[in-house]
Amino acid sequence: MKLSTLLVISAVVALVFGVCFVLVPRVVLSLYGITQGRGEALMSEFFGTALIFAGLVAWFMRKVTDASAQRAVVLGFLIADVLGLIISLIGTLSETMNSVGWTVVVLYLLLAIGFASFQFKKPAAS
């Protein structure tokens, strides 16, 4: 897989979830079995905003060819996806999220694996 493909996938996932968390946070929260108070909805809207930011960064980076910029973005996404994986795993195992939480765990895991493959890939010999 090419880095540009991974960035497009990451952008689409982040933008779809981000827009949903901003526009209909209570609906999204209910899918995961999370209490739907105003505080939770507000935090979901902030989370959605961060996801939209990440999605836009991924989308705008998809055609960048500067190796230094690519490595910086890949490392940032890798760290964020590993943290998301850990948090979603804890949230699902502790039953803060219902079984639908496993979809989030899988998404973060797959994205983390994808970005790790680029982060730890040996540079081509010149």
Image: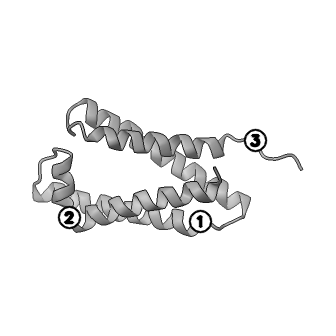
Distance (Cα) linking label 2 and label 1 = 28 Å
- Please tell me in which quadrant of the rendered image residue 14 appears: bottom left
Residue labelled with disc 2: 24
Query: Dot 3 surroundings within 10 Å: few (below 14), some, or many (20 or more)?
Result: few
Whether residue 15 is situated above or below residue 119 in the rendered picture: below
Specify the label residue 61 is tagged with. 1
x and y percent of residue 79 in the render?
A: 51, 45
The reply to whether residue 54 is in sight is: no
Local secondary structure at mark 2? loop
Residue pictured at 41% horizontal, 57% vertical: 13
Q: Name the N-terminal-most of marks 1 and 3.
A: 1
Mark 1 residue type: Met
Whether residue 99 is situated above or below residue 78 in the rendered picture: above
Mark 2 residue type: Val
Whether residue 94 is situated above or below residue 112 in the rendered picture: above
Seen from this angle, which residue lies furthest right? 126
Residue pictured at 39% horizontal, 36% vertical: 86
- Please tell me in which quadrant of the rendered image residue 117 appears: top right
Considering depth in this image, is 9 or 93 the residue closer to the camera?
Answer: 9
x and y percent of residue 36 in the render?
A: 11, 53
Local secondary structure at mark 3? loop
Q: Name the N-terminal-most of marks 2 and 1.
A: 2
x and y percent of residue 62 in the render?
A: 60, 64
Q: Name the N-terminal-most of marks 2 and 3.
A: 2
Residue pictured at 47% horizontal, 68% vertical: 56
Specify the label residue 122 is tagged with. 3
- Please tell me in which quadrant of the rendered image residue 102 appears: top left
- Say whether marks 2 and 3 touch (CB < 8 Å): no
The reply to whether residue 85 is in sight is: yes
